[in-house]
Image (tube, grey):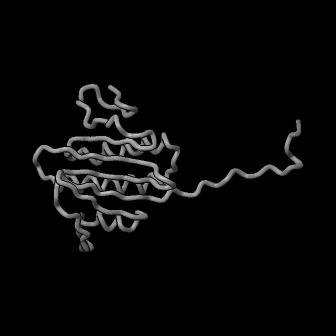
């Protein structure tokens, strides 16, 4: 079964639903909040970055940040059945990533001990993102990050002596 360019097993129910009201420069998905959510979100983002022809350097940072944000959203909602929403957008030279959950908990930037395996997600977000923040409403919160797109070098100019003349 295929869903909007993301290959899925024919035995598995789709874990995400693409939202129809999103403009072409943005895509959004909703998925079950579980231990597979971060991996699915990374795969969807990787695919979309390829569609937008964005490079590997940006893709690595973006996937890491998205993974941290989705993992935090899943953990914030606990074990009750819930959904996580993700949105990727290109806005004026920036890549914008959003993760939405139904939790009203405040994201906390921890100072993890050196031997701890968890607790560095927001530290990574703060270090790698151009900006980030949280928007709350009556149904939960959206954590967003923005990454500045790398400058795309202009193609080299062909010297006038080499140009073809009609």
- Quarter of the picture containing the N terminus is top left
119 or 81: which is nearer to us? Answer: 81
Image height of 51 relative to 142, above or below: above
Instruction: Please state if 45 lies on the left or on the right of 143 as rendered.
Output: right
Residue in the image at 26% along x and 69% along y: 109
Q: Nearer the viewer, residue 84 or 113?
A: 84
What x and y, as percent, mark residue 153? 64, 55
Give whichever of 118, 131 is nearer the camera.
131
Q: Quadrant of residue 120?
A: bottom left
Q: Residue at x 23, y 64 (%)?
A: 107
Q: In terms of image quadrants, where is residue 106?
A: bottom left
* Residue farthest toward the left in the current orientation of the protein: 80
Q: Residue at x 19, y 53 (%)?
A: 140
Residue 44: image x %, image y %? 37, 42
Occupied quadrant, residue 37: top left
Please state if 83 lies on the left or on the right of 124 as rendered. Answer: left
Give me the residue at 24% from left, 71% from top.
Answer: 110
- Rendered location of residue 87, percent (x, y): 34, 47
> Number of labelled discs?
0
Image coordinates for residue 166, horizontal then vertical, percent = 88, 35
Is 8 above or below relative to 46? above
18 relative to 101 in the view: left or right: right
């Amino acid at each position: 079964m295929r869903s909007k360019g993301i290959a899925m097993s024919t035995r598995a129910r789709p874990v995400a639903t693409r939202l129809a009201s999103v403009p072409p420069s943005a895509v959004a998905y909703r998925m079950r909040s579980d231990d597979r959510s971060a991996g699915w979100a990374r795969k969807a983002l990787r695919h979309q970055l390829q569609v937008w022809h964005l490079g590997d350097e940006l893709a690595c940072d973006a996937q890491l940040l998205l993974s941290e944000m989705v993992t935090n959203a899943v953990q914030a909602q606990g074990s009750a059945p819930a959904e996580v929403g993700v949105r990727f957008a290109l806005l004026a030279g920036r890549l914008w990533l959003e993760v939405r959950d139904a939790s009203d908990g405040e994201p906390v930037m921890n100072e993890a001990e050196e031997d701890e395996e968890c607790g560095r997600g927001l530290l990574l977000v703060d270090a790698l993102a151009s900006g980030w923040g949280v928007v709350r409403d009556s149904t939960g919160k959206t954590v967003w990050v923005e990454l500045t797109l790398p400058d795309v070098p202009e193609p080299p100019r062909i010297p006038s002596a080499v140009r073809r003349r009609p």
